């Protein structure tokens, strides 16, 4: 069994924060893979299910970010899950938006949720680092992570969450490298679809305009022109006849 932990803060006001992308990731995994309903357990919310042939428990700690380790430690000990089978999904300032990396252990880079988990279960668990980008200044980091994703971010965030959820079966099997390559492939494909449609539309329309310009006169226009020429010729003859009659009288 694997334990997939999403990090975030509980409550509606934090739901769409950048800091809550871990919660969003495990929510999407549950949705895409038909997991059971969320229920309170281990000082958090738990959902259980399978991805392929692998059993997975999803956990969203409700202890707030800085105390995430209390919930994760309780779940890990009760379920007797080795540290190598604990995957923690979290926001990563040091990765560009949409980039994903997986690492085992290492430093916590100032992330209080990871620091708390390391204090409760040691450090050698897996971290699924979900890039949210750095605001550029340390002074605005807290504002950046504790605010919602911008409207302009929604497309790539949704595409990323779908890619993570669809590739999660490889994490469940312990194939971290294949998970990363699949996420990269799925994430790159998804945002390009609207662009490809936009590129095709003008290409389909452009050939039609030259055809209309290159075509000759419409047949109905030719017939009308011939009728007008015949009427003009008859009128000319009739006026000529009138003049001849007037001169002889």
Image (spheres, grey):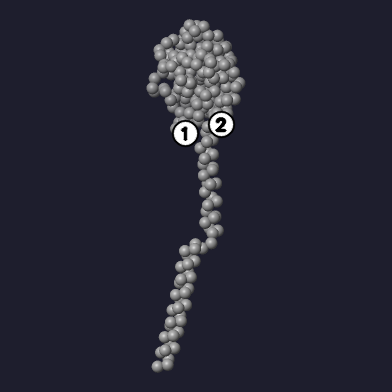
In the picture, measured across the screen, residue 95 lies left or right of residue 234, that is right
Can you tell which of label 2 and label 1 is closer to the viewer?
A: 2
Which percent across, then down, holds residue 40? 40, 12
Q: Quadrant of the C terminus?
A: bottom left
Determine the residue positioned at 50% across, 14% down: 56
Of residue 108 and residue 208, the one placed in the foreground of this image is 208
Q: Which mark is residue 210?
A: none
Secondary element type, mark 1? helix
Residue at x 53%, y 62% (from the top left corner) = 216
- Against 215, residue 96 (above or below) is above
The disc, 2 or 1, on the residue closer to the chain's N-terminal end is 1
- Asked which quadrant contains residue 240, the reply is bottom left
Q: Which residue is mark 2?
A: 188
Which residue is disc 1 drawn over? 152
Q: How many marks?
A: 2
Judge whether 161 appears above or below 80 on screen: below
């Amino acid at each position: 069994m694997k334990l997939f932990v999403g990090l975030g803060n509980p409550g509606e006001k934090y739901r769409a924060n950048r800091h809550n992308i871990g919660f969003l990731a495990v929510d999407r995994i549950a949705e895409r893979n038909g997991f059971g309903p969320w229920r309170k357990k281990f000082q958090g919310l738990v959902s259980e299910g399978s991805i392929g042939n692998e059993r997975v428990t999803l956990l969203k700690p409700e202890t707030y970010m800085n105390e995430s380790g209390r919930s994760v430690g309780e779940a890990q000990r009760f379920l007797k899950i080795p540290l190598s089978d604990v995957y923690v999904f979290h926001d990563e300032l040091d990765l560009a938006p949409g980039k994903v990396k997986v690492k085992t252990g290492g430093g916590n880079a100032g992330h209080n949720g990871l620091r708390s988990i390391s204090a409760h279960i040691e450090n050698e668990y897996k971290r699924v680092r979900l890039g949210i980008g750095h605001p550029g200044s340390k002074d605005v980091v807290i504002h950046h992570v504790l605010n919602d994703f911008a409207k302009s971010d929604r497309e790539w965030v949704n595409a990323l969450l779908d890619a993570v959820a669809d590739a999660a079966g490889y994490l469940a099997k312990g194939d971290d490298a294949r998970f990363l390559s699949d996420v990269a492939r799925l994430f790159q494909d998804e945002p390009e679809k609207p662009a490809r449609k936009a590129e095709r539309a003008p290409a389909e329309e452009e050939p039609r305009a030259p055809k209309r310009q290159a075509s000759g006169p419409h047949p109905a226009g030719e017939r009308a022109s011939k009728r007008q020429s015949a009427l003009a010729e008859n009128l000319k003859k009739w006026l000529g006849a009138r003049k001849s009659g007037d001169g002889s009288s």
